[in-house]
Image (cartoon, rainbow, N blue to C red):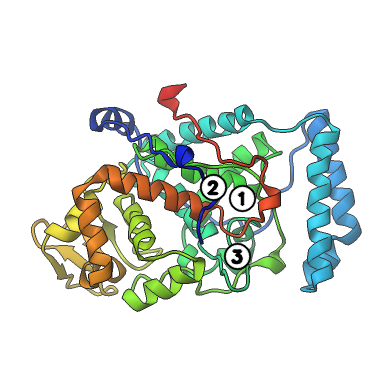
Amino acid sequence: MSFAALRASTRRVAAAAPAARASRTAFRNPAFRKYSTETPQPPKKSSNAALLGALGVAAIGGVGFWVYASNSDSAREAGTAVRSGVQAAKVATNFVPTKEDYQKVYNRIAEILDSASDKGYDDGSYGPILVRLAWHSSGTYDKETNTGGSNYATMRFEPEAKHGANNGLNIARDLLEPLKQEFPWISYGDLWTLAGVAAIQEMGGPKIPWRPGRIDGFAAQCTPDGRLPDAAQGADHIRNIFYRMGFNDQEIVALSGAHALGRCHRDRSGFEGPWTFSPTSVTNEYFKLLLNEKWVWKKWDGPKQLEDKTTHSLMMLPTDYALVQDKAFKKYVKQYADDEDLWFKDFSRAVSTLFELGVPSQQWATPEPWIMKSTDEE
């Protein structure tokens, strides 16, 4: 699963200096969650929005139920036609979103990140849970069947929303729903992945190349349970999950560095605690701790997880620990622990690839991904 469309220039990472990251991330911290398993109704807004809604309803009214209920190739083609018709309606109303329009959405997402501290959520930021939403909505891709991925935003529907790996992501979806009402022209898939990009960049991480073009699908396109990683497993399981998406060992380790962010919750995954001492900052601390800290099995009544021997305040999952038990994985853990810039570069490329999984190339609004501005660049 290569990201061949990316040129070297767009793969570059704008790695902020530690002091700059600290000043920006000092105001931002991890996640919020709720469930919304039904597709929200579009708002009644301006003439453009009203026309878009009317065209969309008319199109869906004609073939919507048939497409929803059928798994045939014809039904899928009809579904694409319906959604393409809605996209055409944007052109008919002389509204074709530009990069500047998506930048406005990005900026509104950045505002939401900071609101967590006022609500006492986790470590004071919704960033980590928005990264998790973007990750889990993309990480269902299967390269053999070309199903899953970020294209249809099927986590909106109950079959996928209720998968165990998605516990708590209702909070992230509900958090972004007001923005979907504010910007009705953006698809859920584009909104969720853009939120992941904004969260990573605003928490001091690298620039993540991103572009719009995902379309919203139907419940019939939900992926089966079991496509996301099971944190209680080991190296073989990790490879099976990520190889299915098209990633290699180096990319697996690079993506795992996202565990620098956020924490586990007993009432969601069964596990408990943060991976690092700075769960709202994108750093290579995860790799340093994984490699250099002494990890012991936690004695408790929950699922098997490890804790640091020094403070007993951090945790690692069995899938995390597998990265230093497996020789092929461990060499990349060492590289990233020693060189944050290298990890930023590889992480940026891998995340951008992840967020584009399952999207046909003809759907992209632009041939090359964009680099969205962080709020401190506005």
**Secondary structure of the residue carrying numbered label 2:** helix
Nearer to the camera, 130 or 328: 328
Q: Is residue 218 left or right of residue 12?
A: right
For label 1, the crowd category at 10 Å Cα-Cα, with few meaning under 14, some 14 to 19 and many 20 or more, is many
Q: Residue at x 69, y 33 (%)?
A: 97
Q: Residue furthest left?
A: 310
For label 3, the crowd category at 10 Å Cα-Cα, with few meaning under 14, some 14 to 19 and many 20 or more, is many
Q: Is residue 358 left or right of residue 226?
A: right
Nearer to the camera, 257 or 114: 257
Residue 367 at x, y percent in the picture: 63, 42
Q: Which mark sits nearer the N-terminus, 3 or 2?
A: 3
Q: Residue at x 24, y 33 (%)?
A: 18
The kind of residue on which mark 2 rests is Thr
Q: Is residue 226 above or below residue 127?
A: below
Q: Is residue 239 left or right of residue 173?
A: left
**Residue, disc 1:** 189
**Secondary structure of the residue carrying numbered label 1:** helix
Q: Residue at x 85, y 67 (%)?
A: 66
Residue 326 at x, y percent in the picture: 24, 72
**Residue, disc 3:** 148
**Residue, disc 2:** 193
